[in-house]
Amino acid sequence: MQNGGFSLLELLLVICIAAILASIGIQHWKDLQLRNELFTTTKQLAYFLEEVQTKAYHANKNVHVYYFLTPWCLSISKGEKPATCQEGTAYFMKPNNSVELSDLTDKKAISFWGRKNMAQTGTIELHNAIGTTQIIISYRGRIRFCKKNSYLPGLPQC
């Protein structure tokens, strides 16, 4: 008489296959989460800079963007660099994720010049474990973003 159940060996084999597939799926999910964090932070920061540029243009005022460390933050000021990030007229604080700001222009400040609709040229580089993106500000005030070395759908290559 035969038993209609599974043997211990068959059960262990199914558990091993399921564990391998789960570990592959978890790693893929983590990579996807890192891609989304980098992509979202890059777009949010670029849109924040576009908003700052628009406000400078409409108010016909020169506006400066300053960089602060630990945790990184960009602060907006119409004059000198504020003592802390929150003392500026507006600021962009590091989101609660793995994205770090790795490079800003040599002067550690970017300026937008009122009605001329122009800006000081500069790049802002963001990175995490999955890759690197750049936000590029041209002299004519154009703000664009691109990916440097990773697979991020929706962003052009630098």
Image (cartoon, rainbow, N blue to C red):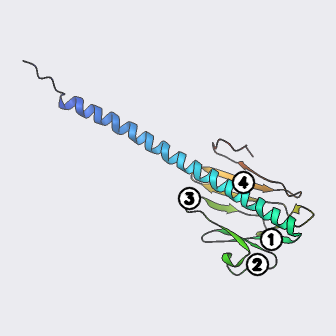
* Front residue of this view, candidates 103 and 111: 111
Q: Residues within 10 Å of mark 3 (few under 14, many from 20)?
A: some
Q: x, y percentage for residue 80?
A: 80, 79
Query: Which type of secondary structure does the marked residue at label 4 adopt?
Result: strand
Tell me the kind of residue under disc 1: His
What residue is pinned by disc 3? 98
Tell me the kind of residue under disc 4: Gln
Residue ID at (64%, 56%): 41
User: Label 2 near label 3: C-beta < 8 Å?
Assistant: no
User: Which residue sits furthest bottom?
Assistant: 83
Vertical placement of residue 68 versus 134, above or below: below
Q: Residues within 10 Å of mark 4 (few under 14, many from 20)?
A: many
Tell me the kind of residue under disc 2: Lys
Query: Which type of secondary structure does the marked residue at label 2 adopt?
Result: loop
Decide if residue 138 is on the left or right side of residue 96.
right
Q: CA distance from mark 4 to mark 3?
A: 16 Å
* Dot in front, 4 or 2: 2
Q: CA distance from mark 1 to mark 4?
A: 19 Å
What residue is pinned by disc 4? 134
Tell me the kind of residue under disc 3: Ser
User: Label 1 near label 2: C-beta < 8 Å?
Assistant: yes
Earlier residue among tags 4 and 3 = 3
Q: x, y percentage for residue 109?
A: 78, 69
What residue is pinned by disc 1? 64
Vertical placement of residue 144 versus 13, above or below: below
What residue is pinned by disc 2? 81
Earlier residue among tags 3 and 2 = 2
Q: Residues within 10 Å of mark 1 (few under 14, many from 20)?
A: many
* Dot in front, 3 or 1: 1
Decide if residue 9 is on the left or right side of residue 26.
left
